[in-house]
């Protein structure tokens, strides 16, 4: 083993999920060796096989729950990690209101268990996947990182609480190096079409829903409100390509390798797009027309928000490089190649026989 291998080995919690799998591809591309911890509750074993198809490197999978302190202790004994990307967590917004305790358990207690295990093992470089939901619905766009916490649901509050806990930790012990990445709306897929997002059941989010309408598995898209005070009346969001987000993780990892303390930083493009703009970009990408019904506003939805993306550029040297059309083209390629997600098709030989390893 070369002497540098320890600092190149990175633990990726939630590495079999949508953003985690793309982060693994970006890590491998940058010369790191990801080891994935995933319960596979939402992540998918096929994603890891596909990472191997894309990169030629198959990340090891440790299948366990992030709250399992004994398994974490074992894991940190078995490997010497140069740092941790922590993406494991629950994120379905509908469910978070109905079942808040599960969110606090997995997102809060899970991070607590992870950070304890890291501290015990002397690994103190952490990149945490947070979310722009910490800002709530009323922040003024472009939203800077010093906007106050104002999350409107338990999910967003768990993210804000974890950030606060990490800030307290860093305050108490200056050996920690932490970055909290506040994602705006990650969409798209790796350009190979081999990994992407396939939510269980009916999608909540715009892009997967749109993809499923275009492929014909859903009849139409409901636009949630056309009476907002935006240019065309529909909601505006900062959609950011998942490979840009993945590359943001690599940039953040390099940052925490250099700098102690804690950095809260937005990952967005700094530009908003309306629902109608996304629909027309997707129609161009797919060459299909999307049936649309106009519905009422979705409760709890903000009219419009997008990131102030300047801090990421200044501190991480990162900015989003891919635009909305590329996001739609890549989402569509993934959807076409995998109409039923990972489980329904086997575009590569490696995926023909699903098996845990
Ligand atoms: N949206 C929509 N129809 C859908 C899903 C979403 O019109 O089936 C709208 C939603 O009201 C918002 C935008 O698309 O303005 C992005 O919604 P998404 O759920 O993807 O992200 P979030 O609201 O969590 O930022």
Image (spheres, helix red, strand yellow):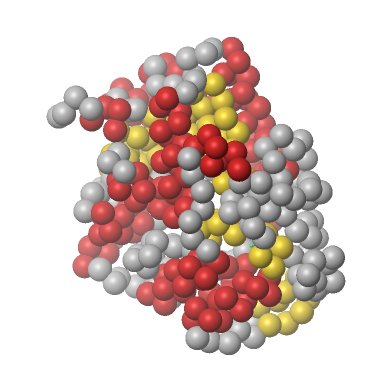
Q: Is residue 242 visible?
A: no
**In the rendered view, would you say 276 is above or below 145?**
below
The image position of residue 312, as x and y in percent, is 55, 40
The image position of residue 325, as x and y in percent, is 52, 71
Number of numbered discs present? Answer: 0
The N terminus lies in which quarter of the figure?
Answer: top left
**In the rendered view, would you say 62 is above or below 268?**
above
Left or right: 25 in relation to 52: right
Say which residue appears at 52% left-offset and 13% top-offset: 174
**In the rendered view, would you say 282 is above or below 12?**
below
Q: Is residue 175 visible?
A: yes
Left or right: 329 in relation to 300: left
Which quadrant holds residue 224? bottom right
Say which residue appears at 58% left-offset and 18% top-offset: 169
The image position of residue 100, as x and y in percent, is 69, 43
Q: Kindly give the residue lying farthest to the left in the view shown.
A: 1
**In the rendered view, would you say 300 is above or below 267?**
below
Say which residue appears at 67% left-offset and 31% top-offset: 161
249 or 143: which is nearer to us? 143
Say which residue appears at 62% left-offset and 67% top-offset: 206
Quadrant in which ligand 1 is drawn: bottom right
332 or 339: which is nearer to us? 332
The image position of residue 27, as x and y in percent, is 35, 44
Which quadrant holds residue 345? bottom left
Which quadrant holds residue 210? bottom right
Left or right: 190 in relation to 306: left
């Amino acid at each position: 083993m070369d002497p540098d291998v320890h600092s190149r080995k990175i633990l990726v919690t939630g590495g079999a999920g949508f953003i985690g799998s793309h982060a693994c591809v970006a890590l491998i591309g940058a010369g790191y060796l990801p080891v994935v911890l995933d319960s596979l509750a939402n992540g998918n074993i096929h994603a890891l096989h596909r990472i191997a198809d894309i990169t030629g490197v198959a990340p090891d999978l440790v299948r366990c729950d992030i709250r399992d302190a004994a398994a974490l202790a074992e894991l940190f004994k078995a490997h010497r990690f140069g740092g941790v990307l922590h993406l494991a967590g629950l994120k379905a917004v509908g469910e978070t209101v109905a079942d808040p305790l599960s969110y606090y358990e997995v997102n809060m207690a899970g991070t607590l268990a992870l950070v304890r295990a890291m501290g015990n093992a002397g690994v103190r470089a952490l990149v945490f996947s947070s979310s722009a939901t910490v800002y709530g619905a009323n922040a003024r766009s472009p939203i800077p990182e010093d906007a106050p916490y104002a999350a409107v649901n338990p999910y967003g509050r768990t993210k804000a609480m974890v950030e606060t806990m990490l800030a307290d930790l860093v305050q108490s012990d200056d050996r920690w190096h932490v970055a909290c990445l506040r994602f705006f709306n990650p969409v798209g897929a790796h350009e190979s079409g081999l990994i992407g997002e396939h939510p269980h059941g009916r999608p909540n989010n715009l892009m997967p829903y749109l993809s499923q309408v275009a492929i014909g598995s859903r009849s139409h898209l409901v636009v949630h409100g056309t009476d907002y005070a935006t240019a065309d009346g529909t909601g505006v969001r900062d959609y950011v390509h998942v490979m840009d987000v993945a590359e943001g993780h690599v940039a953040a990892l390099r940052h925490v390798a250099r700098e102690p303390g804690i950095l809260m930083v937005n990952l967005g493009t700094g530009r908003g797009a309306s629902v109608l703009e996304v629909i027309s970009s997707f129609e161009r990408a797919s060459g299909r027309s999307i049936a649309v019904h106009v519905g009422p506003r979705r409760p709890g939805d903000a009219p419009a928000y997008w990131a102030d993306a300047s801090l990421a550029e200044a501190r991480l040297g990162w900015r989003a490089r891919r635009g909305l059309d590329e996001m739609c083209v890549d989402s569509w390629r993934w959807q076409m190649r995998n109409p039923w997600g990972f489980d329904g098709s086997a575009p590569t030989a490696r995926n023909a026989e699903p098996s845990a390893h």
